[in-house]
Each structure stands twice: as structure tokens, then as C-alpha cells.
Amino acid sequence: LMTTTMRLFILFLLAGFITFSACNKTEDEPEAQQPQEYVATDASFAGFDSWPLVAEEQGPDPALGPAHQGNDSTVTRHIFFKDDQNRVSGEYPIGTIIVKDSYNPDQSIKEVTAMVKRGNNFAPNGGDWEWFMLTADGNIASDPDGHPMRGADLMGGMCIGCHSAASATDYAFAKT
């Protein structure tokens, strides 16, 4: 039979081994961290129309006016959230991507817009969202001078101007 001292010694060694193993991370175990900034590229929007559809709106919407073809009775607007992301503690995580596809039945109207939670104090007065105009296939559109249509004040601040009304839901109207 083991003595009490021997049992305590073995128990102490076992406890030390467990503590050391739990605290000692190997280089193969990356630490999960929230990114500080997410800079979207064309690849960020690839396949957006296969992402979870979180809202569908049709016809005129007085709140939208001309934005997102909100004054056209033939237009349908689909809102997609990449990875069906939800707010965490009231805000969307950095890297959240929302795309709105506005179109009519004959596709003579096709407007694709997006917002990406960029972070890193990119737009502190707008929840750090970056706004985008996209091509029909989800690439970042360019203006007539070849500049990418993206930024904190895209469309002369029109995006943040309207989305400020949704500041309580982190500037997103869907998933309120």
C-alpha cells in the first residue's frame, strides 16, 4: 500500500503536469483574435448571391427614395449577409459583409451595393463601415476615371447619410 506522502506527491506531479500542458501552447496553435482591420477585395464579394438571404423587399420604398432603386415599383431588393453574421454585443464584427442586389425583372436595372465592417478607426463617425458599388458579378466597380467606387463617404456621403438612421443597429437596416 502507498503511503499518504507518496499519494500526495503523485497527485502534486499530476496536477503540475495538467497545469503546464494547459498553459503551454505550441506554435502550431494560433491564438484566435479579432482582426483589427478588414480591407475588402473583389474576392470578398465572390458568390454573394449564394450567401444567406436575410431580407427581400419589392417595389417602392419612400424611406429609400432613389437609393437602391427605392422609387421603382418593378424593383426587387435582396439583402445578403456573408456567413449570416449577426451583431455581437450590439455591433457587427470586423469583416462583416452585407450586399444589396437591386434589380427589375428584365435586368434593365441592376444595382449592387455593399457595406463592409472595416474597423481600425476607418470611419469612426460611421461605425467603421466602408461602402461599395459593385458590378453585377460582385467586383468592386470603378468610376469613369477608373477609381474604385468604395470609401467612407461614397456617393458624396449619401450612404452614411441614410444609414446613420440605423446607428442603433450598427448602421444596418436588415436584421434589426
Image (cartoon, helix red, strand yellow):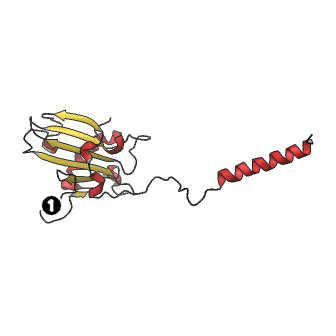
Seen from this angle, which residue lies furthest bottom? 145
31, 114: nearer the viewer:
31
Q: Is residue 10 left or right of residue 52?
A: right
146, 24: nearer the viewer:
24
Task: Tell me the kind of residue under disc 1.
Answer: Asp
Q: Name which quarter of the figure residue 120 lies in.
A: bottom left
Give the residue at x 34% y 58%: 39
Q: On screen, 122 above or below 59?
A: below
Give the residue at x 12% y 46%: 110
Q: Is residue 143 left or right of residue 27?
A: left
- Mark 1 is surrounded, within 10 Å at the Cα level, by few (under 14), some (14 to 19) or many (20 or more) other residues, namely few
In percent of width and height, residue 68 lies at 16, 43
Quadrant where the image shows the C terminus: top left
In percent of width and height, residue 165 lies at 27, 41
Q: Is residue 113 left or right of residue 69?
A: right
In percent of width and height, residue 4 lies at 91, 41
Give the residue at x 18% y 39%: 77
- Report how many numbered discs are placed on residues in the image: 1
In percent of width and height, residue 28 lies at 55, 58
Seen from this angle, which residue lies furthest front? 1
Q: Secondary structure at mark 1?
A: loop
Q: Name which quarter of the figure residue 81 lies in.
A: top left
54, 66: nearer the viewer:
54
Q: Which residue is tagged 1?
A: 143
Give the residue at x 28% y 49%: 115
Quadrant where the image shows the N terminus: top right
Q: On screen, 42 above or below 9?
A: below
